[in-house]
Image (spheres, rainbow, N blue to C red):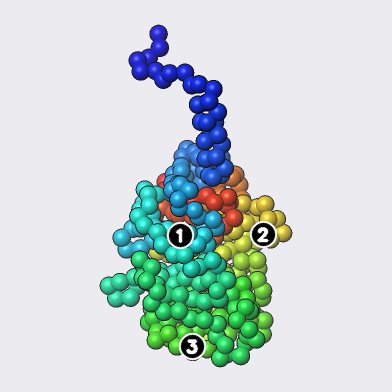
Amino acid sequence: MPPAHSPAPLSRRSFVRRSLETALAAAAFPAFPAIAQSSATLLGQGDFRYRVVPEWGVLGPQTPLKNCHGMVCDREGHLILLTDHTANNVVVYDKRGKLVHKWGTSFPGAHGLSLVPEGAAEVLFITDLQTHRVVKTTLSGQILQEWRWPEATGKYSKEADYKPSWTLHLPDGGFFVLDGYGRDYISRYGANGALEGIFGGAEGGIVHWGPHGGMIENPAEGEPTLLIAMSDQQCLLRLSQQGKILQRLELPGGNPRQIRSRGAHSFVAHLGDNWPKDRNARGFVSVLDARLRVVSNIGGSPPVYDDSGVLAGMRHEGETFMHPHDLAIDGEESLYVAQFASGQTPPVKLERV
């Protein structure tokens, strides 16, 4: 016996119309990677294992994402995503993946996103590869200040050579700009926003393609240092504030695009294993301990070190990710992974197990 209120049979016209609507919806929203749909699969090793939250952050065609580049978590627990779609460069989610608000139409080359405390407030620093600038904004999108190419340094013959990828911020308000897509220089600015110097580049031992993202390290003793994600060089570089190379950490098989820290651990988003040689490689996320040894690869092969401490080549496993570019960490230690060239999919949320 059919259940009560069973739907009436579809007419041929209704069937065709509904089929067309379904096909259009599928075209607008590419399917998520197969493993990302399942919350049963555990990713990572040791103490850092995670479960995917299926379909987190799906917003609809009225909020297009294009390439997801930067992601941060503010004091309110909102997840702020930077995309290079000029319908809405900045998309703000709550932890459930629902839209809070969105803004931004003037960043066609939106790339790096930094969240910086300023007293009781927080501000954003956005780098744009196409407009060759760094922009400081409020969380709601008001532009407070911007910096163009460092012409006065004499390192650039034209503005188009300068393509800033990310900013790194000191506790005193000063900051560094990484020219990761231009000439691989690192410019330093004081807390007042004035240019104070420049280092790196080929003559400073910074190989192209090199300084993509990174973070400031604040040791208990001594001055802060820069830890740089060197993308295609498959390594991290620790630099002094004057540009001296202090340490090189090899991450064979990876392609580190950004580093985020939580407590004694650092999290590295790898765009793709052995990228750019293999542009079909999906990538993964590494967790590093205080000694910068890999202790877990989320969506990747288990880390293996030989007796001399050399890390074996890493690779992705499964299909959870597609080109991780940045990540954010919330108060519950969940990860939110923003991905580049991933078929316009939203960030992947992973809950720690």
| Circle 1: element type | loop
Quadrant of the image occupied by residue 20: top right
User: In the image, what residue occupies the spot 41% across and 79% down?
Assistant: 145
Asked if the residue under mark 3 is in contact with the one under mark 1, i.e. CB atoms within 8 Å, the reply is no
Q: Residue furthest right?
A: 277
Q: Residue furthest left?
A: 120
User: In the image, what residue occupies the spot 44% across and 65% down?
Assistant: 104
- With 19 as the anchor, is 313 left or right in this view? right
Considering only vertical position in the picture, is 113 above or below 185? above
Tag count: 3
Q: Judge the density around disc 1: few (<14), some (14-19), many (≥20) Cα neighbours within 10 Å.
A: many
**Residue 175 image position (x, y, % from top left):** 45, 80
Considering only vertical position in the picture, is 17 above or below 95? above
Q: How far apart are marks 1 and 2 (CA)?
A: 29 Å
User: In the image, what residue occupies the spot 58% across and 63% down?
Assistant: 256
Please tell me which residue lies in front, 37 or 312: 37
Q: Judge the density around disc 3: few (<14), some (14-19), many (≥20) Cα neighbours within 10 Å.
A: some
**Residue 85 image position (x, y, % from top left):** 52, 60
User: In the image, what residue occupies the spot 46% across and 43% down?
Assistant: 55
Please tell me which residue lies in front, 334 or 109: 109
| Circle 3: element type | strand
Residue carrying label 3: 195
Label 3 sits on what residue type?
Answer: Leu
Residue carrying label 2: 275
Q: How far apart are marks 2 and 3 (CA)?
A: 34 Å
| Quadrant (top left/top right/bottom left/bottom right) for the N terminus | top left
Chain-order first, disc 2 or disc 3: 3
Residue carrying label 1: 88
Q: Distance between the residues labelled 1 and 3?
A: 30 Å
Asked if the residue under mark 3 is in contact with the one under mark 2, i.e. CB atoms within 8 Å, the reply is no
Label 2 sits on what residue type?
Answer: Trp
Chain-order first, disc 1 or disc 3: 1
